[in-house]
Image (spheres, rainbow, N blue to C red):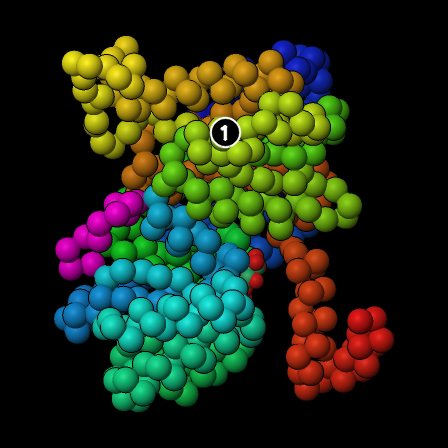
Amino acid sequence: MIKVNIDGCKSFVKDADYGKYLKKALDAFDVLDSEKGAGNDFLGWKTLPVDIPESLIVECEAIRDNWAAKKVDLVVVIGIGGSYLGARCALEALSHGFIRKEGVPQIVFAGSNLSEEYLAELMDLAAIRNVACVVISKSGTTTEPAVAFRIVKEYIEKTYGKAEAAERIVAVTDAARGALKTLATQEGYKTFVVPDNVGGRYSVLTPVGLLPIVLGGFDIRAMLKGAADEREALLVKSEDNAAVKYAAMRNLLYSELGKKIEVLVTFNPKFQYLGEWWKQLYGESEGKDLKGIFPASVVCTTDLHSMGQFIQEGDRVMFETTVTVENSNRELVIGSDEQNLDQLNYLAGQRVEHCNAMAQLGTKLAHIDGDVPQLEVSIERINEYNLGAIFYFFEFACGVSAYTLGVNPFNQPGVEAYKKNMFALLRKPGYEAQTEEILKRI
Ligand code: PA5
């Protein structure tokens, strides 16, 4: 289960204020629980851990096995925002950092930027590998993945022929709407559905996340079980509810102490993309109506050598939430050296993870001294079960927190603004008037 520790905030806040924000968070819990709040047509994520049918898992595994039979060794997963961050987070967390598992394809991501160099280099890789593709877009109309898919699709069709391409391309999209759905139907691609009532950033436990995770060789049954068990725990309304505690404290720090930035900290580089996934979840859910905590992330100890100075002594606008991994999955002991020229013999016999844990504790105390309140979210170790739990925890806590803040957690009206300008500048048909306007501004 996910544990939340707020002790590192205690010296910054008054008990009475925490009590006040606990009450607000408990009221917000009721709003989420009763499903009567703003955005309540996007609450499908709440029951995903218990709703995903075994048949869907089997379908994902059938794609994996079919591609394994073809000796596919590179799967290009195309998507952006909520249509790739969850899968990327899970795959980075669960995979060996350097060695690919025997018989498991390399998973690479495209469509999350419009960089020509990125895509051209990815196609260089495709040219020397045996390729399949998963294209993911809930709306089916997002430009970045659409551009990447046009290029990857053309390559696969040219290389393997049109009939075989239909075997090597899978689409994850809306049940009925959007250009990708139309294209997939026409080309005869196997298609998975993103439920209508699940927004992009809450979709990791739909085929959006589950299919790439299965293709990467991981156990989504365990992930869904972890999420289901965490859901059970979070359904209990109480002051000790982990999501309520997290939502109460972060809103208190924001509203009463002016801590406008939350930095998600990890001491395990495998969780770098947990930070990326979490930033979208909280940024898109809370940053609206001129409100919201700005979500940032760092990987330590790496970033203590770059961002550490600012966190310790810069503008006092932030608090930190450290995701603690209690147990490492590996064991590596530091040896003794007769000459001790590096003067590290005082660590001989210690595990590397002991040094990491002491660095984490030392950082926490230093940052408390530097006026940076410390929240802590803990999991026992990195595995599928605990990842499912942490995904569900952060989603549920986000709903509670955004309602505590007084915003709709499930819309994202602000993400359209850049698209209108980009379409006008690209002279997309239908944007002629905006093109005229925007050309006057540049
Ligand atoms: O959270 C969101 O809705 C967005 O960030 C989307 O995930 C992102 O824009 C991708 O959208 P789509 O899946 O429709 O291509």
Q: In this view, does 74 lie to the left or right of 259?
A: left
- Residue 134, x across and y down, in percent: 36, 69
Identify which residue is drawn at 22% across, 21% down. Answer: 334
Residue at 66% in and 12% down: 15
User: Label 1 is placed on what type of residue?
Assistant: Leu
- Give the x, y percent position of residue 212: 34, 59
| 26 sits to left or right of 109 | right
In the image, the segment drawn in magenta is 94-104
Q: Is residue 100 magenta?
A: yes
Q: Which quadrant holds the N terminus? A: top left
Nearest the eye: 88 or 125 = 125
Query: Vertically, is 152 above or below 383?
Result: below
Residue 98 visible in the displayed image? yes
- From the top left corner, tell me how far across and down residue 128 is, in percent: 25, 73
Q: Which quadrant of the structure image shows residue 13?
A: top right
Measured from the top left, where is residue 296 in percent x and y?
A: 58, 40
